[in-house]
Image (tube, rainbow, N blue to C red):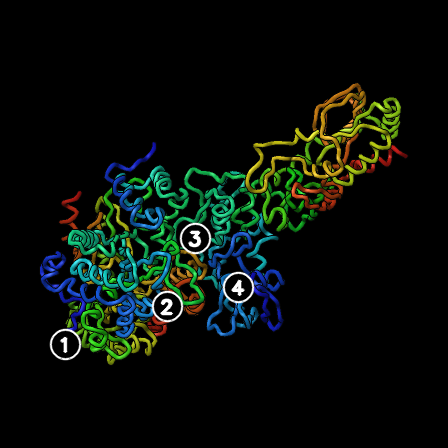
Amino acid sequence: MSEMIEIIVDGESYTAEEGSRLIDLLIQEKIKVPYFCYHESLGADGNCRMCMVGIKGQKRPQIACDTFITKDMFVDTKNDTIQKVQTDILELELINHPVDCPVCDQAGECSLQDFYMDYGLHNSKITISEKVKHNKALDLGSNVMLDQERCVLCARCTRFTDKITHTHELGIIGRGDDAKVSTMPGRKLDNAYAMNVVDLCPVGALTSKDFRFSQRVWFLKTAESICHGCSKGCNIYIDHNKLKYKDDVIYRFRPRRNDDVNGFFMCDDGRLSYKELQVNRQENILYKNEELTEDEAIKEFKNKIDKYANNTTIIVDANLYTEEIEAILEFAIEIDAQLISPLKIYEDEDFKDDMLKSSQRAANYQTIKRLNIANSTSTKSDLIINFNHPSEINANEKISFLTHKSDSLELIFPIAAFSESSGTLVSEDGITGKCQKAIDKNNPAPTIIEWLKKVRA
Amino acid sequence: MRDCRLVSRKFDIKNSFKIDIAKEHGAYKTLDKAYALKPLEIVEIIKESNLRGKGGGGASAGDKWALMPQESDKPSFLAVNCDESEPGTFKDRQIISKDPHLLIEGILITCHAIKAKHAYIYIRGEYKQYQDILQTAIDEAYSDGLLRECDITIHRGAGAYICGEKSALLESMEGKRGHPRLKPKQKEPEWFFDNPTLVNNVETIASVPFIVQNGAQAYRDFGTEQSPGTLLFAMSGHVQNPGVYEAEFGTSMMEYINHFGDGVKNGKKLKAVIPGGVSCGVLTADECENLTLDYEALRSIGSSLGTGGMILMDEDTDMVEALKNILEFYHEESCGQCTPCREGTGWSDKIVAKILAKKGTKEDIDKLFDLADVMNGKTICVFAPSVSVVIVSFITKFRDEFEAIL
Amino acid sequence: MSFSFNEENLVKIEELKKRYPSPNALNLPCLWMAQYQEGYISIDAIDEIARIIHMPSMEVYRVATFYTMFHLEPQDKLIVDVCKTLSCKLCGSDEILNHLQNKDVRVRHVECLGSCGTAPVMQINDEYYENLDTKKVDEILGEML
C-alpha cells in the first residue's frame, strides 16, 4: 500500500494514494472531466484524449487517465487552454458522427450528448458534408446491435471481450478514419455477458436489440434492486414506466455497481430475466378454476387450515425476501405446520461459470439456511401450503400463493413479484442487499405479508 | 566540399554487398577492437561523439544507449528501424542493398555495448528485393562465424508508415496492430515483450563502426559542434540529379543542391524545398538561400531537418495541390487510435479538396489552422504534430495561392 | 475448407519460433507465408495462424486488416501499385496512372515507396520498376500480361 498524500485540484485540497490514477480521484470526488475510453473495470487506453487536464510543471495538457498522483501535484481542470482542448476534441468526435439522436436509443444517456452540453455548444464549423460511411444496423448476436458510424472508437467493447470475458469476439479493424469495430466475418458476439457492452458503450453504437426503439430513457423511472436469477445477488437497476392508459411495465434491467458483489456487470440471463416477471402472471384468486372473491377465498383458506390442523406442510420458495420468509416461519409456528424448502431443484451445475453465475439459482437460500428451514422433500401431511416454490410436491389438498399461472385446480392466491414490493436478500457470499419496490401495478396483487395479515384477521 | 563518405564509402563498388568484396574494403575490421572494449566504454564513445539518431528525430543516440540496463535478469534486444516510409526518404535502402555488411558490423558492435544477444531488423514490406540482399548478407556473415555473439533476424512489415514510430514498431513486432504506445513519465528503454530494447535507425547503427574505429573526436571533426558527423542527405522532386549523397552537417543547402544535384531540373527557378521528408515545415526558396543543413539551423527557422530527404519544387508547382498530396498521405497512414489525429487528418484532407475544387471559403482556411492547433501536442505520438506543422507552414508561406482559388 | 501451411513453411515457422521471446511475434511472418502460399489470406488461414502463435483469431484478423499489403480476398487481376506521393507526383506519376487506366490490371494508388530519387515508380509483386515513362510501362506489362 502506498502512502496517502495531499494534492490540489482546482484550488481545493484532496487526499489520494500516491501512484494511483488521477482520473480515479476526479471521478470519485465528482470533479467533472469528460472521458470516453477510460473505465474503472477496463483500465486506461488513452485514445479519446478528452480527459486532458493541466498539471503544473508540464508544458502540455496531460490525460488524467495516464497521470499518476505524485507529491505536490497541482491540477487544473478548468483553465481556458483545457476548455479549448475539450471543445476542439469534442468537435472532432462529432465530425463523422451521424446526427441520429432522433432515432438513437442512447439519447438521454449518451456521453457525447452530455459532453456536448457541457463542453461543446459549437456553432457548427463543419463545412464539408461527406461523413465517413459504415454499416448502421449490424446484428452482432446476443441481442446486441452495432452501428459503426456512431462509434467513437473508444475500444471499451473490444477491451471487454479481451480482458473480461476472454472471448475476443470484437476488435477494431482497418486503419485511420476507416477503422471500425467488428466481429470476424460470419462470426457472432457469443458469450454469457455480451450485453454488458451496451452499458459500456458511451454512445449509441452498441444498443440492446431487446430494448431497441421501445422507450425513451428520460421517461423511465429507476429502482434499485437485486437480480433473482441466481444466488450471486448482482445489484441491478429496474427501469420501468407507466404509459397513459397502460400498466407500469419494466423495460429493462441494468447492472448496478457494487464492488463487493458484481462489480459493473451482470450476466445476460439475469439481465433478460425481467421478461418473466411480466408474462403469465397469476392475476386472480382461483379455486377449481373458478374465480373467487377475496372474502370467499380467505374463508376457504381458514376452513382448510382448521380441517388439517397438525397435518399441514408449508413449502417456501428460496427466492422470497427475507422478511417474507420470516413471516412465513412465524405463521408456520402459529399453525404448527411442518416447514420445508427443498433446495435441490434450484441447483444447476450447467449454469455456473467462473465469473458471476452461480450453480445455486435460489436468490435467498442463505436465509433458508440461517433460519434452519429443512431442506427436504418428504412430507406426510394432507395439506400443503405452497408459497411460490417451484416443486411438484402434492397432497390431498393444496393451497398455493403464486406469482405465475398454474394449471392445477387447487386454491390459488396471486402474489406480488419481487419487483412489485421491497425487501432484502442475502447472497451466497453472505452479503445483504436491499430491493426497492419498482412496479406499481394498476391492479396490484397483495404481497405474501399482506395475505398473511388478511388470513389472520 | 570535402569527402565525407563515412557510411557510403562502398556504395559505388561493384558487388559491395558480397562479404568477400566488403571485407576487402574494410568490413568487420572494427570488431576486434570493439570486442576488446567493455560494453560501457563503447556507450561512452558513442555519447562523446554526440551521434544523433538519423531516423528523423535527431535525438542523442548515446543517451538512448545509456538507458539500456547493463545488468538485468531480462534479455536485452536491439531493433533496427528500416521501416523508411517518410516521403522523400530513400537512404536506408542504399545501405542495406549496397553495404549491408556495414550495417551488420554496426549491429554486432551495438549489441556488444548493450549486452544484447539478438537483433531484429524491421524492414518495410515493400522493400522485399532489398530485404533479400540483406538476408543473403546475414547468411554470409553467419557462415563466416560472425554471428556467434549475437544473431540477427529480419522482421518484415506489411505497409504501414506508422510502424516507423519506435513504439509502434515494437507493437508490430509483438504481433499486434502498429499503435504507438503511451509515453512513460520517466526515461526508460523501450520494451519488447517486456524486455528492454533499443530502437535505432539503420543509418545510426551503420555509423557506429566508424566512430568506434576512429574515436569520437574523429566523428566530431565532421559537421558542426551540435550536429556532428554526416548524414545521407537526399534530393528528389524537381532536381536535375536526384539521389542520395552523403554530406557533413553544416553544409550549405544551396551548395549541396548545386554540387550533387546540379540544381533545379530543366533550368527552372526554385520555389520551395521540404528539407527532410514531408513531415517538416516547407521552406521558400528565399529561406533556403543562406541555410545550412544541420538540426539547429532548421529549428531556428521554424522547420526541422528530419531525415534530410529534400524535396525540391520548381516555380510551376501548385502549392495547394502539393499540400493536398501530403495530406492524403497522412489521411491514409494515420493509425486511427486517437481522436485528434484520426479525425483531423481526414477532415483537413477533405477541406483542402474542397479548396482545390474552387469551393473553399475563408472559414475553411481558418478551420485548417484550428485543426493544426488541435493536432499539436494532444496525441499519443508525433504523427499528428507533423501534420500540424505541414498545414501551418504551407498556408502561411503560400497564402496567396490558397486565397487565389477561394 | 480448412487451411494448413505446407511443409516448407512449417519448417520456417519452427525455426522462427526459436528467434523470438514469444510465438505472438510470428503474426506478421505467418500472414506473409499464408499470402504467398494461397495468393491471399483466408479466414481459415487466420484461424490456423491464431492456433500456431497462441493468439485469438480476432487479433490476427485485426492485424491483417491494418496493413496495406495484405489481401483478404482472392485476387483476379495483376495488382500494380503506383506511388502517388509528392516526389513521384512532381515527376509525373499522374501520367503513369492515366496510362494504366486502359490496361487489364488492378491499379492501386499507394503512398511513398521509398524510391523518390528514381520517380515515378510502380511496384508489381515484390519488384520495383523505376524511372518510368509510358513506354517502359508498356514494355513491362507486355511481358507480364
**Residue at the image position 30 percent from the left and 53 percent from the top:** B159
Task: Write down the chain letter for disc 2.
Answer: B
**Residue at the image position 16 percent from the left and 56 percent from the top:** C133
**Measured from the top left, where is residue A432 in percent x and y?**
70, 46
The residue identified by callout 4 is A19
**Measured from the top left, where is residue B102 in percent x and y?**
18, 62
Q: CA distance from mark 4 to mark 2?
A: 39 Å
**Measured from the top left, where is residue B223 in percent x and y?**
22, 77
Answer left or right for B372 relative to B256.
Answer: right
**Label 1 vs label 4, nearer the camera:** 4
The residue identified by callout 3 is A132
Position above or below: A29 against B4? above
**Label 4 vs label 2, nearer the camera:** 4
The residue identified by callout 1 is B2
Q: Are marks 3 and 1 on the same chain?
A: no
**Label 1 vs label 2, nearer the camera:** 1
Query: Of the numbered discs in the image, which one, if any, rests on residue B391?
Result: 2
Locate the C terminus of chain B and report the quarter of the image it occupies: bottom left
> Looking at numbered disc 3 in the image, what kind of residue is underneath it?
Val
Marks 2 and 3 close (CB-CB < 8 Å): no
Q: CA distance from mark 2 to mark 3?
A: 22 Å
Asked whether residue B176 is in view, the answer is yes
> Looking at numbered disc 1 in the image, what kind of residue is underneath it?
Arg
Q: CA distance from mark 1 to mark 2?
A: 37 Å
The front one of A429 and B11 is A429
